[in-house]
Amino acid sequence: MGAMPEEIDALVSHLKCRETRERAGRTFHVGTLHGREVVIVFSRWGKVASASTATELILEHGIGAAVFFGIAGGLDGVSRGDVVVATSLVQHDLDASPFFPPLHVPMLGISSLPVDEAMSRAIAKAAERFVVERLRVDAPAQLLAEAAVGEPRVRRGVIASGDQVIFSRHTRDMVRARAPEAVCVEMEGAAVAQVCHEHGVPFACVRTISDVADDQGGEHVKPFLRGLAGAYTRGIVGAWLGGDPRG
């Protein structure tokens, strides 16, 4: 699953034996990628839309595992161009108090939504290979410069999700107060994690830091929308599935 159409396009162009299936207003691209059977789909934005997409993947396509890719705003110790692979995910805007503590998911008895550790470790290693070996080769130099990408790192950490674009210091500080362990913030991952958890489907979430969720975020994200995010997703998937970070 991808958070942006641009990321989906970067992967779909490499699909073999491709067919498309239209359902629930979404286009599911089915085929093989690096010899693996895959379904690629744009999640749409926000928790409800991405949860609906994940449910379609599980019930209608019978997927055995799900991986979510996209950009995110950095919160703690990350810079533009870094890659975050989730250790767990939380919904920073979920608050059913006084019946439950903030972030607590009613009926599940947890606040922190799990990922598949083995799959996440493998993807993190693939991401490290990509940023070291291929990023400067595969990604346009102009976009890397515009995004002020230095020496990107791969980090494992908590990812926070909520139905709000975080492009101000005030809202960023609110997220950090609600989810102090979170490394970055986005709009879909935790919702997909909850669906996968409830269905027993292994899940991993990978986010490229496009901005630091501040008042300049709208400008900083533009190079990622123009191709940089797609280059990251294609390269990481290639290194993970095919052992080739060129995608």
Image (cartoon, helix red, strand yellow):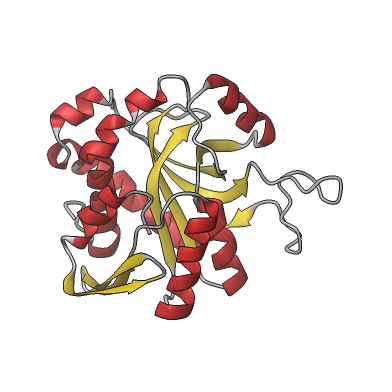
Residue 185: image x %, image y %?
A: 51, 38
Q: Is residue 133 above or below residue 41?
A: above
Q: Quadrant of residue 219?
A: top left
Say if residue 96 shows up in the picture.
Answer: yes
Q: Quadrant of residue 181?
A: top right
Q: Is residue 194 left or right of residue 239?
A: right
Q: Is residue 29 left or right of residue 187?
A: left
The residue closer to the viewer here, 21 or 146, is 21
Q: What count of labels does the image hold?
A: 0
Residue appearing at x 39%, y 35% in the figure? 209
Residue appearing at x 48%, y 78% in the figure? 59
The residue closer to the viewer here, 114 or 56, is 56
Image quadrant holding the N terminus, namely bottom left
The residue closer to the viewer here, 47 or 144, is 47
Residue 154: image x %, image y %?
A: 39, 40
Say if residue 115 shows up in the picture.
Answer: no
Image quadrant holding the C terminus, namely bottom left
Q: Residue furthest right?
A: 98
Q: Residue furthest front?
A: 25
Residue appearing at x 19%, y 30% in the figure? 143
Q: Is residue 60 left or right of residue 143?
A: right
Q: Is residue 23 above or below residue 132?
A: below
Residue 31: image x %, image y %?
A: 23, 74
Q: Is residue 152 left or right of residue 214?
A: left
Q: Is residue 6 above or below residue 165?
A: below
